[in-house]
Amino acid sequence: MLKMKFTIITLFEEALRPYLETSMMWKAAEKGIVEFDFVNLRDFGIGPHKSVDDTPYGGGDGMLLRCEPVYAAIESVIDKAGAEVRKSEVILPTPDGEIWSQALARQFAGVDAPDTSAEAIEKSIAKKVPESSVDDSRTIDDVKHYIILCPHYEGYDTRILDIVDYQISLGKYVLTGGELPALIMIDSIVRLLPGVLGGNSSALQESFSEGDNIEYPQYTKPADFRGKKVPEVLLSGDHGKVAKWRKAHEKLVK
Ligand code: ADE
């Protein structure tokens, strides 16, 4: 069932498609959990050259994204949003925005933080978490629709902010456009949606890996690689001891 829709307004759809049509993003779309669609800002450009930018009033270097194409593109997307969408929200990637985090990804995904107590870890190791109880902790109502506006060039007319709901920064550095931030936001949100990672039958995946706010050292075969040995407790089969070891070695990723 469709849970989330992203409309990306960009001049460079070809930069976004390869990532969104690969691996987990592609699978999430194939499963019908998420839908991606693209709007070319140029289609809303001004004059014979379909111009989307102009020089700043007051002088200075560079070109700024104009209001008219941006407002026209966003209004057209909102007008065309399907009946399943209750509300569309506009995200602007910008170095001035709120710094992106796992907590924000969860908020945008509409899911709760996972239970990271030792008891919950033990249950998940033993795969004792019934699917229904996992799903109960999640809260996604209607289809959420996010419109991501990817600015390019040197900046944008500040009046664009009046049509934006969220200004998000990926970090304290400047990129050439909003496409990479858009992909990072989408990836970190979509992987949290129920059914995207690991399949519903995997209690371990459902309870912990999706939230990824805890991490501890992990090992796979062989048990001894060039003298680097897997800790005995992880080979013991004792779920309680394994859970305690993981809890003691966890690092919080905020
Ligand atoms: N656009 C340019 N730089 C950016 C950044 N650091 N985060 C989000 N959007 C941006």
Image (spheres, rainbow, N blue to C red):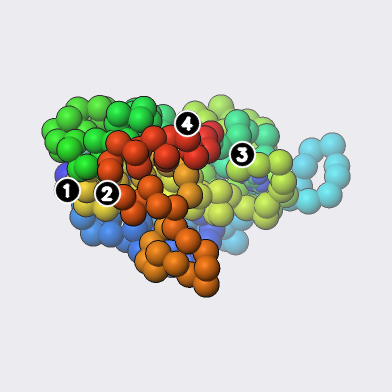
Q: Secondary structure at mark 2?
A: loop
Q: Nearer the viewer, mark 4 or mark 1?
A: 1
What residue would you read off at disc 1?
201
Q: Residues within 10 Å of mark 2 (few under 14, many from 20)?
A: few
In the picture shown, does residue 35 fall above or below 157? below
Q: CA distance from mark 4 to mark 3?
A: 14 Å
Q: Locate residue 133, reporting x and y percent.
A: 17, 30
Q: Which mark is residue 87?
A: none
Q: Earlier in the sequence, mark 4 or mark 1?
A: 4
- Quarter of the picture for ligand 1? top right
Q: Secondary structure at mark 3?
A: strand
What residue lies at 86% left-to-right and 45% top-to-bottom? 60
Q: Locate residue 200, reporting x and y percent.
A: 19, 47
What residue would you read off at disc 2?
237
Q: Nearer the viewer, mark 3 or mark 1?
A: 1
Q: Quadrant of residue 156?
A: top right
- Confirm or deny contact between disc 4 and disc 1 (CB under 8 A): no
Q: Which mark is residue 103?
A: 4
Q: Locate residue 249, reporting x and y percent.
A: 49, 40
Q: Secondary structure at mark 4?
A: helix
Q: Nearer the viewer, mark 1 or mark 2?
A: 2
Q: CA distance from mark 3 to mark 2?
A: 44 Å
Q: Earlier in the sequence, mark 3 or mark 1?
A: 3
Task: Tell me, yes or no, if residue 61 can be seen here.
Answer: yes
For label 3, being within 8 Å of ligand 1 is answered: yes
